[in-house]
Image (cartoon, coloured by chain):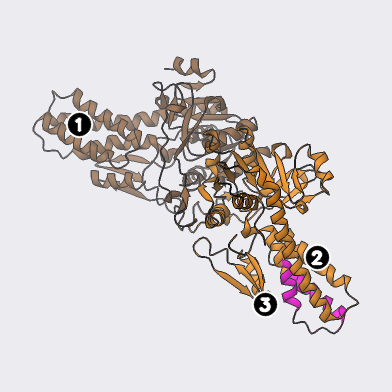
Chain colours: A orange, B brown
Amino acid sequence: MKYKTVSWETDKIRLIDQTKLPRELAYLDCSNIEELWHAIKHLIVRGAPALGVVAGWGVYLGLRESKAKTFEEFFRELESTAAYLASSRPTAVNLFWGIERMKKVALDNKGRSVEEIKRRLFEEAKTIQKEDENLCMAIGEAGEELIKTGDNILTHCNAGFLATAGIGTALGVLYTAHERGKRFHVYADETRPLLQGARLSTWELSSSGIKVTLICDNMAGFLMKQGKVDKVIVGADRIARNGDAANKIGTYSVACLANHHKIPFYVAAPYSTFDLSIPDGSHIPIEERDPREVTEGLGRRIAPEGVEVYNPAFDVTPHSLITAFVTERGIIKPPYEKTIKRSS
Amino acid sequence: MKYKTVSWETDKIRLIDQTKLPRELAYLDCSNIEELWHAIKHLIVRGAPALGVVAGWGVYLGLRESKAKTFEEFFRELESTAAYLASSRPTAVNLFWGIERMKKVALDNKGRSVEEIKRRLFEEAKTIQKEDENLCMAIGEAGEELIKTGDNILTHCNAGFLATAGIGTALGVLYTAHERGKRFHVYADETRPLLQGARLSTWELSSSGIKVTLICDNMAGFLMKQGKVDKVIVGADRIARNGDAANKIGTYSVACLANHHKIPFYVAAPYSTFDLSIPDGSHIPIEERDPREVTEGLGRRIAPEGVEVYNPAFDVTPHSLITAFVTERGIIKPPYEKTIKRSS
C-alpha cells in the first residue's frame, strides 16, 4: 500500500480525495470539523471502516479548540459536535460507532480536566485508526493462504485500502498474498451505480502492482462459464448471527453465479461486522437510494425523464452461498451457527 | 406501437434517431446511401432485424439512380453498393443477410431490363420490411399466452420495436399481451455497457403505456430473491441447433439467476435466428468490442487510463437454462434436440 486513505498530519486530517480518482491522486486536508463534514458528505472519504476512523478524528477536531470550563459544558459541545458530524451521512453505521466510542472516553473521564479529556480523545482517535490498520493486517494474514499463484479472482465494489485506514479487507487479503510473492490476476466488477469497482478498485490494485481487468457487472457469469474465475472475494457491511451477509448491491448475484459454477465465494470483514443481535439477514434493513444515482450518476442522463427506478444500496447474501469468512480471528467456515459464535 | 423505427416515405427511408433517445424523439430521413451508411455506422438505427430491413432499402437507394445500360454494368454497381453498405457495420450478420437477398433478386431477374430490376428491388425491400412486421406480430401472438395480468417481467437489452421494423420480439410479446388487456409490470436491466435497456426499452415500454422500472444489471438477483420477478423474456441474436442461444452480454447471468430462483426464462426470436448448421453454442464466435464502451461510454471516463478491460458483446446461454423459445411458428419447448428441428 503506497497511499494512506486517512492520516493525521500534525494538526489536521489528510484524506485521499476519492472523488478525483481515478483521474488524479489528490489529498484534502481538513483542519476543522466543517471541512471534514463536507468531505464525508461529498464522498471524498467513504468506506465503512474509514468512516469509523474519520469519526474519531472528527470529534477531536470539533472539540480541540473548546473553551469549556466544566465537564457538563464540554459534554454539551461534544454532543452538538457529534450530531453535526452524524448529519454528514446519516446512514453510515460506522460513523455512529466511532462517535459513540469517543463519547464513551469523555464520559469515562468526566472527573478529569477538560484539557486532559481532550488529550485522551486525541489518543482514542489515534487508537481507532491504529486498530483499523491492525485489523486489516490481521485479515490479510488470515486470508492470504486462500490465494494461489495463477489464480483469477473476482471482486465486487471496493473493499480495499480506500475503504479503510489500513490495507483494506477483501483487497487486503490480496495485497498480503502479493507481498508474499504470489502472482495472480483480479477481475473487478465495475459495480453500478456508483462504479466503486471501476473508479477505485482498478486504481488501487494496479497502483499496487496487481494485474486487474475491469468488467461490467453483467459479464461475471460469462467469465465464470468460461472457467476464467477461480474464486471470489468481497467485503461486507453487516453480517447476521447465522452468516447472512449484507454488502454492496450486486454481491448476491455474484454469490449465486459462483454457486452455480461451483466457485468458492469468500467474505472478508472485521469480526465487529458480525451483529450477533440479529438472527438472520431478513433483519438487515436495505437502504434505497436516490434514483438519480442510476439515471444520472455517469455524467449524462441515460434514461427517460420520470422513469421509475429501483436503487437498493445493498443486498443480503445467504450464508449457504458463502464458502468462508475471513476475519482478524481467522477463517470461519460452516456450520456457521456454531463457528460464528465460537469465534466471539 | 405508436412509432415506426424504419419506414419508406415516398422517396426516402425514415429512421427513428436512436442516438437522441431517450431525450428526444427525432427522425432522420436518408435520401441516399451515404446518409444511410452514416446512420448505421453511428447506431442511429440498430437491432438485428431492423438492420436486415434497412439493408434492403439501402441497396435500393444505392441503385435507383443507376444509369447502367446492361445487367453486367448494373450488377457491378450493386456489388460495390453492397460492399459499401456492409462496411458500415462489418459484424452485423443481418445486414449481410438483407444485402444477399437483394443480390439474389437481381440475379434471378438478369434477363430483364435495368428499370424492371430496380422495380423488383424496390418490391423486395418492401417485402423484407413487411415480412419483419409480420414476424413480430406472429411472435407476439405465439407468446402472449405466457403473460398474465399481475406479472412482474424482467427483460435485458432491447428486443423491442426499436430493434425491428415491427413491434419487436421479446417486447412484441408484451405489447401483444398488453393490447389484449393484460396489465403487468416490467423490470428493464439497464444493460451495460451501451445501456440499451435504460435508454431504449424504458422509453419504448412507457411510451406504449406499460409500467416499467429501471434497474442496474446487478440488481436482478436481489429482485428475484425477494420474489419480485415472475418470468424473464429476452431476445436472441443466434441460436444453435441444440437451443444454446447467443444474446447481449449479461443474458447468461440473468438465465443462471432465473434458474437458481426457479423462474421461467423465455427467449423470443424469429425462427430464422436458429442456425441449424451449428450443433451447439460453442460454435458461436463472440465479438469483443472497444474497451472505451466500458470506460467512456457514459459521458465521462470512469476508470484509470490504460486499464485492462474485457468487453464481450454477447454471451451464450445454454439450452438447459431456457424454459421455452417463442417464434412465429409457435412456442418451442424441450427436449430441443427434437422440437427445434421438428419446427423447421
10 Å crowding of disc 1: few (<14), some (14-19), many (20+): few
Q: Which residue is mark 3?
A: A10
Q: Secondary structure at mark 2?
A: helix
Of marks 3 and 2, which one's residue comes earlier in the chain? Answer: 3
Query: Residue B167, percent across and down?
Result: 44, 35
Identify residue type, mark 3.
Thr
x, y percent for residue A3: 59, 63
The alpha-carbon separation of the residues under discs 3 and 2 comes to: 24 Å
Element assignment for label 3: loop
Residue extent of the magenta highlight: A55-84
Q: Give me the C-alpha separation between circle 1 and circle 2.
A: 83 Å
Marked residue chain, label 1: B
**Along the line of sight, which residue is nearer the eye, B16 or B230?**
B230
Give the image location of residue A301, x and y in percent. Answer: 49, 56
A161 magenta-colored:
no
Q: Are marks 1 and 3 in contact (CB under 8 Å)?
A: no
Q: Give percent across and percent down for residue A46.
A: 64, 61
Q: Residue at x 62, y 65 (%)?
A: A4
Q: Which numbered disc covers residue A100?
A: 2
Q: From this viewpoint, is residue B165 visible?
A: no
Q: Which labelled disc corresponds to residue A119? A: none
Q: Residue at x 80, y 68 (%)?
A: A102
Q: Amino acid at mark 2?
A: Glu
The one of B140 and B44 positioned closer to us in this rendering? B44
Residue at numbered disc 1: B119
Query: Is residue A74 on the magenta stretch?
Result: yes
Main SS of residues in magenta = helix
